[in-house]
Image: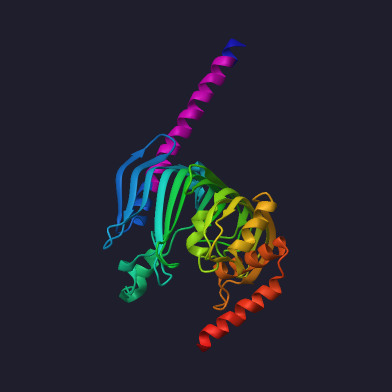
Amino acid sequence: MKKWAILVGIVVVFLIGGYLGLSFFGVKLIQPKLQKLLGPGFTLQEINIKLTHLSMKGVQYEGLHTKLRYLWIEEVRIYPAILSLLKGPLRIRTFEILRPSFSFYRTKEGVFVGLWKGPEREGREEKEIPGGEARQEREPSPLKIDRLRIERGSLDFEDRKPGEPPAQVKVREINLEIKDIQYPFRSVHSPIELNGKMQGKTEKEGEIHTQGWIDLETMDMETSLNLKEIDVKLFEPYYRKKVSAQIDSGYINMETNISVKEKVIDAPGRLEMTHLRIKEGEGTVFWVPAKTLSPIVKEKGDRLQVSFHMKGDIEDPTFKLQETFLTRIGLSFLEALGVPAKKVGEEAYEKKSKEKKE
C-alpha cells in the first residue's frame, strides 16, 4: 500500500510540473501577439510571464494629440487553455482586467470620443500596400475567451451635447463578466452580468445591475436593467428642456427588460421616484406648473410610480432614444398624477405654435 502511495505521489508531481511547464510555454506564445495589438497611444509599464498566466501592469492609452488619458488598467491577467496551444485555435480560459479606469466624452455635435475614437484619428485613411501582404497580416487570428472579467472598475463620462454645464456620469465599483467571446466576433449569445455604483450630487450612491445576454457581432441583446436610488439631479442636463421648474431632490428606482433585435429596441419597464421635492414657484414639469404639481406630489408622500414602454428603430434618424424616453416618462408622469395628458400636450403644442408665429 505504501509503494502505491509513493507511486501516485510521483505521478501527481510530474502532472503538476508538466501543467505548469505548458502554462509557462503558453503565455510565452501569447506575449508577442499582445504586443502587436498594442498600437500608437498605448504604453505598458511591466509585463511578466508567470507559471500559469501572463501579467501586464500599468496599461495606459492616451490620445496622441489631445493628451487625454482614456484608459488606465492596474493589471491584466491572461490564463491560456493549454490544449489549445497544441491544437488551436487559441483559447483563453480567463481574461481578467483588474481596477481599470475608463473615460470618454461626447462633443456638442454628438460625436463620442474615447479609446475607440479620437479627433486625431478622424479623416485618417488606410494606406494601400501592393500585393495585399499587409492586409493579410492585419487579419486577426481566431481567438476564444471563455470568461472576461472586469473587477472594481470605474467609468467617467462627460456629455457636452445637452449644453452647459455638461452632464457628468461617474460609475464606480464596476464588476463585469461576459462569457463565451469569440473573435473575430460570431453570432452567439454571450451571457453578461454587470454591477456598479453611480455617484450622485449627494453622499448616497445609486446601484446598477444588469444581466442577460449579448450578441457581440449583431449587438442584439436580451437583458434586464435595475437602477436603485439614483440621484435624479444627475440627469438634469437631459431633462431641463422639459422641466424648467427647480427639482430640489429625488431618487430614481427603475426596472426594465431591454430587447434589441435587428436594431429595434423594445423596453417596457417601471420607474419610481422617491423623496421627490419640487420647489414651488415659476416653471413647469412636463408642461405642468410647479405651483400646481408640488402639492399633488406632497399628497402622494413625495413618491411617484409610472410605467413606460419604449420601442423604436435605433438607426432611424427620426428616432431619438433620449427624447423618446423622456416623452414616454413625461406622459406616464402626467397619468400618474391624474392630469389629462392629451389636453396638456395640446396646450403645449398651441403655445409653441404661437411663439413661432410671433
The prevailing secondary structure element of the residues shown in magenta is helix
Work out whether residue 138 or residue 159 is closer to the camera in this orientation and state it: 159
Location of residue 179 in the rendering, given as x and y in whole percent from the top left corner: 57, 49
Q: Residue at x 51, y 55 (%)?
A: 233
Marks counted in the figure total 0
Location of residue 150 in the rendering, given as x and y in whole percent from the top left corner: 48, 45
Query: In the image, is 345 to the left or to the right of 7?
Result: right
Location of residue 346 in the rendering, given as x and y in whole percent from the top left corner: 66, 79
Q: Residue at x 55, y 68 (%)?
A: 242
Q: Is residue 318 visible?
A: yes
Q: Residues in magenta?
A: 5-30
Query: In the image, is 99 to the left or to the right of 119?
Result: right
Work out whether residue 320 or residue 342 is closer to the camera in this orientation and state it: 342
Q: Residue at x 54, y 61 (%)?
A: 281
Q: Quadrant location of residue 343?
A: bottom right
Q: Quadrant of the N terminus?
A: top right
Vertical comparison of 27 with 222: above or below: above
**Residue lying at the far top of the rendered structure:** 2
Q: Is residue 286 visible?
A: no
Q: Is residue 284 magenta?
A: no
Q: Is residue 22 magenta?
A: yes
Query: In the image, is 275 to the left or to the right of 151?
Result: right
Q: How is the image coloured?
A: rainbow
Work out whether residue 196 or residue 329 is closer to the camera in this orientation and state it: 329
Vertical comparison of 202 with 187: above or below: above
Work out whether residue 116 or residue 344 is closer to the camera in this orientation and state it: 344
